Structure formats: structure tokens, C-alpha cells
Amino acid sequence: MACTSCSTSDGGAPKGCKNNGTCGTDSCNKLTVFDWLSNMSLPSGQAPFDCVEVRFKNGRKEFYRNTEKLTLSIGDIVATVASPGHDIGIVTLTGELVRVQMKKKGVSPTSNEVPKIYRKASQKDIDIWSVAREKEEPMKVRARELAIAHKLEMKISDIEFQGDGSKATFYYTANDRVDFRLLIKDFAKEFSTRVEMKQVGFRQEAARLGGIGSCGRELCCSTWLTDFRSVNTSAARYQQLSLNPQKLAGQCGKLKCCLNYELDTYMDALKGFPDFDTRLVTEKGDAVCQKQDIFKGLMWFAYTSNYANWHVLKIDKVREIVADNKQKIKVSSLEDYAIEIVEEVEKDFNNAMGQESLTRFDQPKKKKKPNRKPKPAAEKVGSENIIRPANENKIISAKLAGKKPPRPNNNKKPNNNNPNKSAAPKDETKPNPQPRKPIIITKNENKK
């Protein structure tokens, strides 16, 4: 099925996304080929090519022979040969381009091994297919639980039901070989269907599941890339990329396939460059290359005695020095051949309308109303307005004047109701003195 939102009508044409099976979400547009020969008529007397390309779930494609001479077009849902029973797929390519694709995949058009198409899918076929597709997601969750219960080091990434619902294919990834014979028995008991296990690589798993890459676009392997070339770290070295595995790895955990896209261009540009290990001999000493700019044709050299100072040379000057060194001629210094790089001033974007402001649509904040309540009188001490008790104000003013502060009045007589307890003088300087706890004296302590 194209995607979960693309249910089908009575006539068999996809609906839901209303794009006739060519939407750009989920997998409707996965691994499609633009038929640029669709508007061209065949020469007189030439029969149309009798093979078509049919796509199944998550980009799985097969070639089938149209032996019944059905009138097929891109987007038609057809019933094809399967083992056992039949399968349901969507026609993705017809005509002469199918011959080109078969040649690219190494499939012979005249081979008897090419399966055939039974018929266009009826509404009953589509209903059975839709019911089988709805079972896949809950079945995948349960299958992972059973694999964990058997303590198998494998990951079940996807499940694909056959169009008639008679067989389920379990796609899994694993680092080593896995003995899943007992697991298949549990799957057959749990799901009551025929089970087929198929191991795929990590790149194939990412292609089946899809996703968004670090570039912000859908993964290449799930949209148009069909052949996986080997990628190694030398591609990153030639492009002068930092060898950071977190940045160079894709969602599959392997090196990104896009590292090979521009590699040929970099290799052609590097043909005119001297080797990075080139050593220049001067009267001041030997110099080695530290950096090179492929697009500007520049190389940075530094003396072995002072790696901090770098000198920028054009590649033609470097070749001149190398030619002189081959003749055992030492140049005076790198400074005679070095150039100065003038930093370009960045042009600021001048927007007179102020449209670059992100808050131009926000509502203006309400201004706070001034507080018109009368404030209590306070004595200014230095630069602060502090409200203090009268006795404390006298002490502070005396300290500022350089005089001794007045002593607290301790002439008050203590309370003689309790002769064994002396009343402590009350500290009036503290604004909020805490009450003291009463002291209870027993008779024995009183005698002592």
C-alpha cells in the first residue's frame, strides 16, 4: 500500500492523499522514476514493452510480465504471482523505461523467470490487503517482545504481509548469526500465519524505514538511491572534513552515502595540487604544508622551526619552488613568494522597513501605572532610605559624627518576684528581639 492515509476507492485508484499515489510522504513517492517517455507515441508497428515495474511496501520493487495484455498505467493496483498465493502491488513504471531499468538491474527481459501479473486488483483484494497491513504494527511490537524473551541479539525492524494475508515476512538486523528456530515456532503459534525471516543490512533497514537526515531532507536511500557504494574515511579526508564519527555517520550508523557525491570533483581539483607531504627547502629552513584550499588554489606552509607562523602560497609558486629544489637550488625564504589574504568585509543587510524584527507582530506591553500612594517618612542615611526605630537612628547618627554611641538605659530595676532569676537587660537596639524561653529550677538545684 502506498501509505496509511491512501485508502482506495471502489475503482482501485488510491484516495486519501488525493495525489494518485505520488505524494511525498511515507512511501508513496519512494524510489520513483520519472517517465519522460510517457507523452511520446511508439513508432508504427512496434508493440509496447510487455514488462512493468511493480512496487510493494517500503520501496521493494519487482519486474512482472503483462501476459494478459492489460491496459496498465502508473498508480494501478495489480495482483501478481507470489509463493504461495498472490501479492498486491502498485505499478510504478511502464513502457520502454522498464527495459532500461531491467538492464540496469541485470534482469533479462526474455527470461522465463520473470513472474506475471494476474489481473487488476478487485475491491475484495484491496480490502484483504488493507486488513493485513493494519495488523503489521501491533504484530511488530509483540514480535520484539518474543525476541527479547528468547534473549536473541537481533532487532526486528519491519514486518510485511503478503497481499492475500497468507504469509508475513519479518525483516531483522543482527551483527552475528542468530539461531531463531524456536522463535519462528512461537511466531507461528502467536500469529497463526506462515512466517519468513529475512536479514537485511543497516543501510537497507534505514532505506525501508525512512527518515529525515541532518540536511533536513528525506533520506536518499529511501527516496531515490538504490545501489549502495562503499564509503570510507578517505572520502572525508580528500574533502578536508573533520573525522568526527558523530557528524560523518548517518541514521543507519554507517558513513553517509553523500560523502561520495562530490568526491570525484574534489579528486579532479586535487590533480593540479602538489602533494600534501611536499617539503620546501629554503635558506631559512625547511617548510611543510599545514593546510590547503582546494577552491582558491592556496596552500599554507610553515617552517619546521616555527610552526606558529603560516605563509600563504599559490600552487603555481609552490610548483616553482619544488622545481628549484629538484635542481638543488634553495630559495631565499617563503616570505618572497607569500601573498597577503585580505579579509572581505561582510555586507550587512540593510532593511529600512524593519521587517527583520521577530517581535514586530507581538502586542506592545502595557506600561505600569505609577504608584501614587504616599510613602512613609524615612531618614536618609548616606545614599539609602532606611526606616529604623528612634534609638537605632541615634546610634547610627553618632557613629557617622565620630562620637561614641549612647549606652542603653540599664537603670531599670529587675523584677524581684523570683530572687533566683536575674532579669537580663533588654536590648532595645534590636528591632524585633525574640522572646527567651523561661528557665525552670528544681528544689535540689536551689539548695546547691
Image: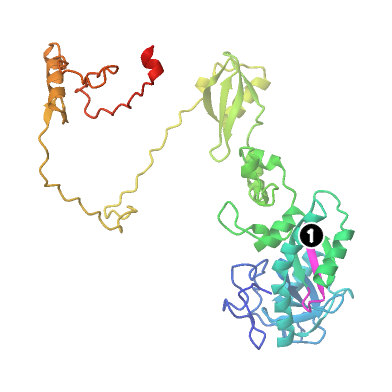
Residue at x-position 32% and y-position 54% = 359
Report the front residue among 197 and 417.
417
Residue at x-position 58% and y-position 31% = 291
Q: Is residue 310 above or below residue 227?
A: above
Please identify the quarter of the rendering in which residue 121 is found.
bottom right
Q: Is residue 51 above or below residue 264?
A: below
**Residue occupied by mark 1:** 146
Q: Is residue 164 magenta?
A: yes
Report the front residue among 377 and 363.
377
Q: Which residues are magenta?
A: 162-172
Residue 322 drawn at (x, y percent): 64, 25
Residue 20 drawn at (x, y percent): 61, 79
Q: Is residue 225 visible?
A: no
Report the front residue among 340 and 126.
126
Q: Is residue 139 magenta?
A: no
Q: Is residue 320 above or below residue 227?
A: above
Residue 400 drawn at (x, y percent): 14, 16
The C terminus, quarter of image: top left
| In the image: residue 343, left or right of residue 218 | left
| In the image: residue 279, left or right of residue 153 | left
| In the image: residue 446, left or right of residue 296 | left
Residue at x-position 67% and y-position 17% = 328
Residue 364 drawn at (x, y percent): 25, 55
Q: Is residue 310 visible?
A: yes
- Decide: few, some or many residues near mark 1? Use Cα within 10 Å; few <14, some 14-19, many ≥20: some
| Mark 1, secondary structure of its residue | helix
